[in-house]
């Protein structure tokens, strides 16, 4: 069970990319809007099927995905064990 209630990954929807539950709105699309400096109000006006809470969860989701990255310095990819 995912800790994110509003974000789903379903291979039948948008090729399995993370989307807002019940929509075809991609998490990446909302992150792009945020990156461009758009306000929540601008995003909500352009994506009427999502909510402010959806955007807040996208931000938390992105933060946790980044925090969970494993970066190994000084090794070639072929030398890194994937156990």
Image: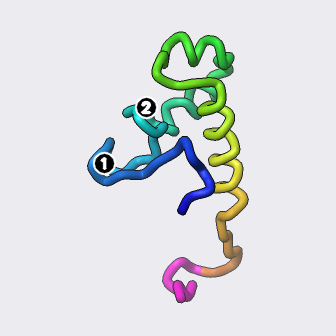
Q: In this view, does 51 lie above or below 2?
A: above
In this view, 23 is above or below 39: below
Q: In this view, does 62 lie above or below 72?
A: above
Residue 32 tag number: none
- Assign a secondary structure to mark 2: loop
Where in the figure is residue 44, as x and y percent of width and height? 57, 16
Image location of residue 60, percent across then percent down: 69, 45
| 46 left or right of 59 in image | left
Q: Residue at x 70, y 49 (%)?
A: 63
35 displayed left or right of 18: right
Question: Does 31 sit above or below residue 50?
Answer: below
State how the image is colored: rainbow
Q: What element carries label 1?
A: helix
Residue that mark 1 sits on:
15
Q: In which quarter of the image is the N terminus?
A: bottom right
Q: Where is residue 47 in the image (x, y as percent from the top left)?
A: 48, 19
Secondary structure character of the magenta stretch overall: loop
Towards the viewer: 61 or 77: 61
23 vs 81, nearest the viewer: 23
- The span shown in magenta is 76-83
Q: Would you name the residue on which mark 2 appears?
A: 25
- Identity of the residue drawn at 60% across and 12% down: 42
């Amino acid at each position: 069970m995912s800790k994110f209630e509003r974000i789903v990954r379903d291979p039948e929807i948008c090729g399995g990319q993370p989307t807002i539950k019940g929509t075809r709105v991609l998490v990446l699309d909302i992150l792009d809007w945020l990156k461009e400096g758009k306000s929540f109000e601008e995003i909500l006006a352009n994506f009427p099927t999502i909510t402010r809470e959806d955007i807040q969860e996208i931000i938390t989701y992105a933060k946790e995905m980044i925090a969970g990255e494993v970066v190994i310095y000084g090794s070639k990819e072929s030398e890194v064990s994937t156990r």
